[in-house]
């Protein structure tokens, strides 16, 4: 099966291309560096020729609200328009758990717009909503730092290893279109302030985590369950401390 991975050179995309290839699929990484640009349409017709499945794990280079909205709307429209004449039978997109619960957040709003375009396209689709990746946890701490303190809201948090996100997306992609969504999350749920307190201790980081109910998460204050999945989500098996140990050993 030919599977085109939009954003196939990035964190999740590169893992997806490798995993699909290991299972005998023709997995093609599509990104500006490989001559495919979904914002301009360059290379789309060529790379989609003969493709049965398209997986979109691309991301905006800017998280500024207007820029991220323009990225996802333009990229998704161009991609769907090119898929129709190519005869693509399954469009898979990676999105975020909680998009509908924090619509005031610019990034989440952009992902909702992307999903609406996909749902109304007429092309069979599957949406995979994932919680935050382990790989971005340090970045969240840095973004939340004020002097020597890290301000974190006391809401529920359930991050997942990028490896397991790629596995989940790959499984969905080679199956029948869901014409709906699935949620994937890590195996452990905790309060976000407690998670970061433990994480900083594991890193040997001297910063102090301060519990702040008004602390922002990518520009917005999350609710108690904004960032965690509903019942029935697919849960990974890799725990953060184990992942951290494996990453440090590489």
Image: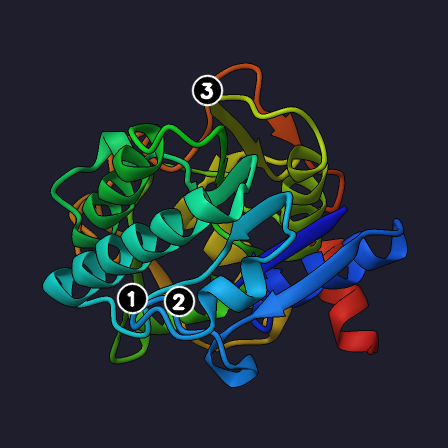
What residue is pinned by disc 1? 144
What residue is pinned by disc 3? 230
Locate residue 171: give its quadrant: top right
How many residues crowd mark 2 within 10 Å: few (<14), some (14–19), many (20+)? some
Relative vertical location of residue 234 with respect to residue 28 in this rendering, above or below: above
Residue at left offset 59%, top offset 57%? 49
Please indicate whether residue 29 sits to the left or right of residue 106 in the image.
right
Residue at left offset 52%, top offset 76%? 205
- Which of pointers 2 and 3 indicates the residue nearer the eye? 3
Locate residue 141: give its quadrant: bottom left
Please indicate whether residue 97 sits to the left or right of residue 236 in the image.
left
| Residue 66 can be seen in this image | yes
Q: Are marks 2 and 3 in contact (CB under 8 Å)?
A: no
Relative vertical location of residue 106 with respect to residue 37 in this rendering, above or below: above
Q: In 3D space, how far apart are the residues under numbered discs 2 and 3 (Cα atoms)?
A: 25 Å
> Measured from the top left, where is residue 51 in percent x and y?
63, 50
How many residues crowd mark 3 within 10 Å: few (<14), some (14–19), many (20+)? some
Q: Are marks 1 and 2 in contact (CB under 8 Å)?
A: yes
Please indicate whether residue 103 sits to the left or right of residue 174 in the image.
left
Q: Nearer the viewer, residue 140 or 129?
A: 129
Helix or strand or loop: what does disc 1 sit on?
Answer: loop
Q: In 3D space, how far apart are the residues under numbered discs 1 and 2 (Cα atoms)?
A: 5 Å
> Measured from the top left, where is residue 48 in percent x and y?
55, 58
> Measured from the top left, where is residue 97 in percent x and y?
41, 36
Relative vertical location of residue 173 with respect to residue 58 in this rendering, above or below: above
Of the residues under marks 3 and 1, which one precedes in the sequence? 1
Helix or strand or loop: what does disc 3 sit on?
Answer: loop
Badge number at residue 141? 2
Residue at left offset 30%, top offset 30%? 224
């Amino acid at each position: 099966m030919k599977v085109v991975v939009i954003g196939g050179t990035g964190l999740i995309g590169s893992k997806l291309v490798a995993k699909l290839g290991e299972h005998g699929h023709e997995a093609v990484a599509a990104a500006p560096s490989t001559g495919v640009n979904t914002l301009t349409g360059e290379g789309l017709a060529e790379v989609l020729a003969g493709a049965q499945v398209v997986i979109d794990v691309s991301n905006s280079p800017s998280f500024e609200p207007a820029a991220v909205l323009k990225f996802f709307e333009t990229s998704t429209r161009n991609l769907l328009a090119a898929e129709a004449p190519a005869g693509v039978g399954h469009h898979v997109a990676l999105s975020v758990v909680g998009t509908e619960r924090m619509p005031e957040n610019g990034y989440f709003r952009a992902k909702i717009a992307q999903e609406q375009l996909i749902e109304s396209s007429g092309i069979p689709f599957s949406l995979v909503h994932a919680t935050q990746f382990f790989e971005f946890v340090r970045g969240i701490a840095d973004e939340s730092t004020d002097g020597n303190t890290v301000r974190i809201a006391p809401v529920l948090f359930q991050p997942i290893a990028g490896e397991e996100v790629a596995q989940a997306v790959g499984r969905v992609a080679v199956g029948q279109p869901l014409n709906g969504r699935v949620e994937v999350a890590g195996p452990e749920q905790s309060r976000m302030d407690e998670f970061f307190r433990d994480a900083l201790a594991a890193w040997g980081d001297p910063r102090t985590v301060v519990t702040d109910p008004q602390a922002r998460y990518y520009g917005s204050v999350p609710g108690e369950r904004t960032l965690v999945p509903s019942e029935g989500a697919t849960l990974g098996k890799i725990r953060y401390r184990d992942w951290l140990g494996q990453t440090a050993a590489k």
